[in-house]
Image (spheres, grey):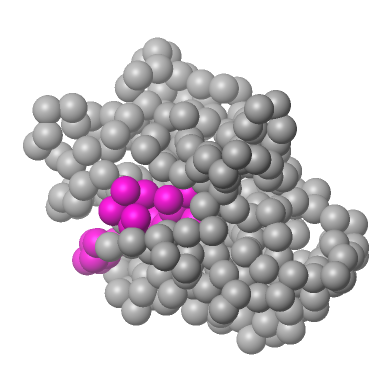
Amino acid sequence: MSTLSRRILAAAIAVGVVAASVTGVAIAANAGTESSSAAASSAAAASSAATSSAAAKKVTLPPVNGRFDYQIGGVYPPAASVKIVDRDRTAKPAAGKYNICYVNAYQTQPDDAKTWSGRNSDLILRNSKGVKVGDPEWDEYLLDTSTAAKRTRIAAIMNAWIDGCAAKGFHAIEPDNLDSWTRSKSAGTQLLTKADNVALARLLATHAHGKGLAIAQKNTPQLGIAGKKTVGFDFAIAEECQMYTECDAYTDVFGRNVIEIEYTDNPLKAYTTACAKQGTRISVILRDRDVVAKGKPDYVYKSC
């Protein structure tokens, strides 16, 4: 899991936007073939998105400014006042809450090692020497989104996970590490691009909407309006946006449909300022960096 975030081809923009009807109702309750050219790949993806958007189901957004609890590091019963809960895809949703399903869509996780072994081992990004490219802050490797064929294979895996989220009763997904291209530099060469990751995001958004799930843009303020208009993200989950003066980049695009998370290993002023500036307009919480379960020694949770 990455904590820092730091338009896509004109042809794809011209073709159309992945659109899913959204409502603001608050609820308590293999391998593909390499394309012969970048233009051909872009046109195919855009055509697919346009076709599937017609079949997209209505999705429900998180309640605006609803109290949020981030439980991706450990599950526990949320407080009665909590309206939105975010849990890992392997967990069950919280009864009576709006539930977001966390999926590490752009990097590996230790407990998913088997997924990325064997015939899928080539989906892990490697440098020119064949060494896996890792996230410097977490025990994770970057997935290789550099070709249409690999993106198709990654999406097939993620889509199965998304199906699982839908079957369990989650209302939205949070595909993490969208900004992995910013960590893909090796020996001075950046191995992934923003366009690579956006292309994968379009595939995931189309599938999620087809399952009736909303999809969050996780961090990545660099996308601007393209996150909503080109990819089809419905709302944003922004880590440390007050700390790094990025919150406006999300609210300018998604309005009040933003969830902000500040962390305890930064100055407390980031959280208190966020509460003072936007705590009555969007969901803002403070959490310990590892988002451990309640009852653990490092557990911290506050909400504006």
Residue drawn where x is 28% and y is 37% of the image: 291
Closer to the camera in the image, 32 or 17: 32
> Which quadrant is the C terminus positioned in?
top left
Q: Position of residue 151 (x, y in %)?
A: 63, 64
Depicted 208 relative to depicted 141: above or below:
below
Count of picture labels: 0
Q: Point out the stretch of residues depicted in magenta.
A: 91-113
Q: Position of residue 31 (x, y in %)?
A: 60, 75
Residue 18, image quadrant: bottom right
Residue at horizontal 90%, vertical 57%? 10
Image spot of residue 91 (x, y percent): 24, 62
Question: Which residue shows up at 72% across the image and 45% down it?
Answer: 193
Q: Position of residue 184 (x, y in %)?
A: 61, 37
Query: Does residue 67 lie above or below 155 as drawn?
Result: above
293 sits to left or right of 60: left
**In the image, is 72 to the left or to the right of 147?**
left
Give 21 or 172, whichever is nearer the viewer. Answer: 172
The answer to whether residue 76 is left or right of residue 47 is left
The residue sitting at the front extreme is 129
Is 219 rendered above or below residue 84? above
Q: Is residue 10 above or below residue 60?
A: above
The answer to which quarter of the image holds residue 250 is top right
